[in-house]
Amino acid sequence: MKKLKIAFVTSEATPWSKTGGLADVSGTLPHVIAELGHDVILFTPRYSSIDGKRHKLVRVSKVGIQKIKVGTSTYCFELLTIKKPGGPARVYFIDCPRLFDREALYVDPVTGKDYKDNDIRFIFFAGAVLRALETLDFRPDIIHANDWQAALLPVYLKTTEKSNSFFADTRTLLTIHNLGYHGMFRMARADNLGLDRSHFYSMAPLEFWGKINFLKGGIHYADIISTVSETYAREIQTTDDYGCGLEGVLRERRDALFGVINGVDYDVWSPEKDKLIEKNYSVATLRDKYANKRKLLSLSGLSPNRLEKPLIGMISRLADQKGFDLIEKIADKLFALNFTFILLGTGDQEYHELCQNLEEKYPDKIKVNLTFSNKLAHLIEAGADMFLMPSRYEPCGLNQLYSLRYGTVPIAHKTGGLADTIIDLDKDRRHSTGFLFKEYKGAALLKAVKRALKLYRNKRSWNALVKRGMKQDFSWSRSAQAYLDLYQKTLSS
């Protein structure tokens, strides 16, 4: 494979900004691809939460001050980079305080709703990336755009930039990390995009039920589309439950739609190296996992007498999508079973109240942490025996991948990335790594938990299951190679 020039464009990336899994992918994948011998640069906005001194940001003098017109307004930006990069990919920050000097990335903390100018912010972002590429004289073979915030890049490459010889050989890959977020705006704001009206008539590339839809436009114009698991790529073409209204558009592009499972950074998420857990362990020293279980019970205020009882952990946003509606339906039957349950996460108020009520009802066996703590998240992965993920849909999921490496057996709904990464005990006993339930029903979830608790009593069989999971390889090098294959498809599309 020839050395490729790749521009990776994302609205968030660790360790600089994060609201979800997109940031984890963006903070790792470009570096892994660069390590494989390709020339990769990453573009992301510079939010006010990104401390310039802490991250050693410097201005790129070659670029200077650039201007981008959005609608009737003009916005200026400078390009920042890292003085001493932490990885092989170069990282550039689009610095426009007028649009991005905000602590929260997309949602106004005062109103709890999306910023009213999110369309302008990410129209500008797409334009700024294109002008920065020209000023840097970086002619990308591939622009890898991620989610709705970067979905206008494929649109502009095929429309306003179509006659720009600088991008004549550039192709686009759009990765959808969660189809639930489209980037939708009132049609009255269409002029801000700088496109002619043919893009906004009923059923046009950027029109969706009378509104502008950035993601729909990206799906229509991208050379190749990917999402974060093969099963999710199929699911989103089926019904509105999965396709979120874009299933028809995705079916039209089915020959250009692929799924690639996210990877895991095993330098951060592995029990052998984890600096946040009580005691490190491996397949060969599995008994040391108990030190983490003991610590987790102690921190949770639960009796050490529960050490020999199965402990189920859950780290999640508290919402219907994550299966809390199922838990609510079967709560009393579920928690009448003989196991301990520790939850970490925040979300909808109704589920905060549900979990608090359950903790009050079963104080000896349930601990609820309505917050987020990275340290506690690592300890739950290390200290729990099982990990619960009853998601209604799950594009990829990362916690089940962490759980497998930590010897924490996943119990999950058979959907999206969960279906692609967990092998159910009843399907293939020899290669199984966890427990799946097919129907999205409370009774099916309850049955899966009972199956797991039954096997837990057979220590020999349980330990064999645990060790198979710990030996699974979901490293980023594997996923990066799959993306390189997609880049080749993109270039030949």
Image (cartoon, grey):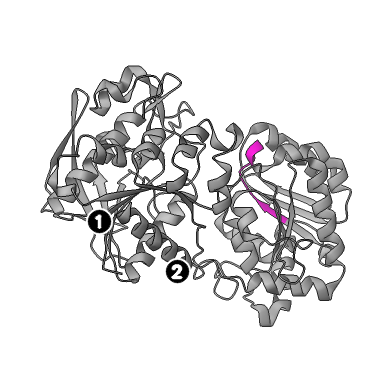
Residue at 64% of width from left, 65% of height from top?
A: 404
- Position of residue 152 relative to residue 137, above or below, is above
Which quadrant of the rendered structure holds the N terminus?
bottom left
Residue 138 at x, y percent in the picture: 18, 56
Whether residue 319 is visible here, answered yes or no, is no
Residue 2 at x, y percent in the picture: 27, 68
Span highlighted in magenta in the image: 313-321
Residue 102 at x, y percent in the picture: 35, 38
Residue 49 at x, y percent in the picture: 36, 46
Mark closest to the chain's N terminus, 2 or 1: 1
- Image side of residue 456 versus residue 68, left or right: right
Extreme residue in the bottom direction:
284
**Dot 2 amino acid type:** Ser
Which residue is the site of mark 2? 477
Badge number at residue 337: none
Marks 2/1: CA–CA distance: 21 Å
Residue at 66% of width from left, 60% of height from top?
A: 422
Please name whichever residue, 408 or 278, is drawn nearer the observer in this view of the structure. Answer: 408
Extreme residue in the top direction:
188
Which residue is the site of mark 1? 141
- Image side of residue 426 versus residue 164, left or right: right
Crowdedness near tag 1: few (<14), some (14–19) or many (≥20) residues, C-alpha within 10 Å = many
**Dot 1 amino acid type:** Asp
- Position of residue 415 relative to residue 303, above or below, is above
Please name whichever residue, 165 or 118, is drawn nearer the observer in this view of the structure. Answer: 165
Residue at 26% of width from left, 67% of height from top?
A: 3
- Image side of residue 397 versus residue 457, left or right: left
Crowdedness near tag 2: few (<14), some (14–19) or many (≥20) residues, C-alpha within 10 Å = some
- Image side of residue 204 versus residue 398, left or right: left
Marks 2 and 1 in Cβ contact (< 8 Å): no
Whether residue 366 is visible here, answered yes or no, is yes
